[in-house]
Image (cartoon, grey):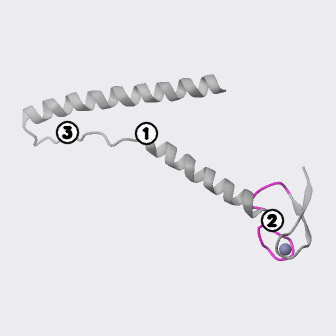
């Protein structure tokens, strides 16, 4: 879809593909700075969301005492179960929302 948009900087009309990153043909300034800022904020938010559920797994050290290893394995088991449940819930939400 082709449209034109008035440049907020120089006031000339430029071809606009409705892309927030489109620039003015005359002065190269962003045609829709609000949409661009909104898009960047959305990208940052999605980055944060994906980082929220990536947890650091317990590292089992070969030099650890067997009791430590035993408890670390139990902890790791809980972590794996927890992450699986969260992933399943997220998948279910995505499925229901779609
Ligand atoms: Zn311009």
Contact between marks 3 and 1 (CB within 8 A): the answer is: no
Q: Earlier in the sequence, mark 2 or mark 3?
A: 2
For the residue with label 2, is its CB less than 8 Å from the closest atom of ligand 1? yes
The part of the chain drawn in magenta is 17-30
Q: Quadrant of residue 9?
A: bottom right
* Neighbours of disc 3 within 10 Å: few (<14), some (14-19), many (20+): some
For label 1, the crowd category at 10 Å Cα-Cα, with few meaning under 14, some 14 to 19 and many 20 or more, is: few
The image position of residue 88, as x and y in percent, is 47, 25
Looking at the picture, tell me which residue is in the foreground, 21 or 97. Answer: 97
Q: Which residue is mark 2?
A: 31
Q: Which residue is mark 1?
A: 53
User: How much space separates mark 2 and mark 1, taking CA atoms?
Assistant: 36 Å
Identify which residue is drawn at 89% across, 73% down: 11
Secondary structure under tag 2 reads loop
Q: Earlier in the sequence, mark 3 or mark 1?
A: 1
Tell me which residue sits at (40%, 27%) in the image: 84
């Amino acid at each position: 879809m082709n449209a034109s948009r008035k440049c907020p900087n120089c006031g000339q009309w430029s071809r606009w593909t409705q892309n927030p990153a489109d620039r003015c043909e005359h002065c190269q300034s962003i045609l829709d700075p609000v949409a661009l800022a909104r898009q960047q904020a959305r990208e940052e938010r999605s980055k944060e969301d994906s980082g929220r559920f990536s947890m650091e797994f317990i590292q089992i050290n070969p030099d650890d005492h067997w009791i430590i290893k035993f408890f670390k394995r139990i902890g790791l088991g809980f972590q794996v179960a927890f992450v699986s449940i969260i992933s399943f819930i997220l998948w279910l939400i995505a499925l229901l929302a779609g």
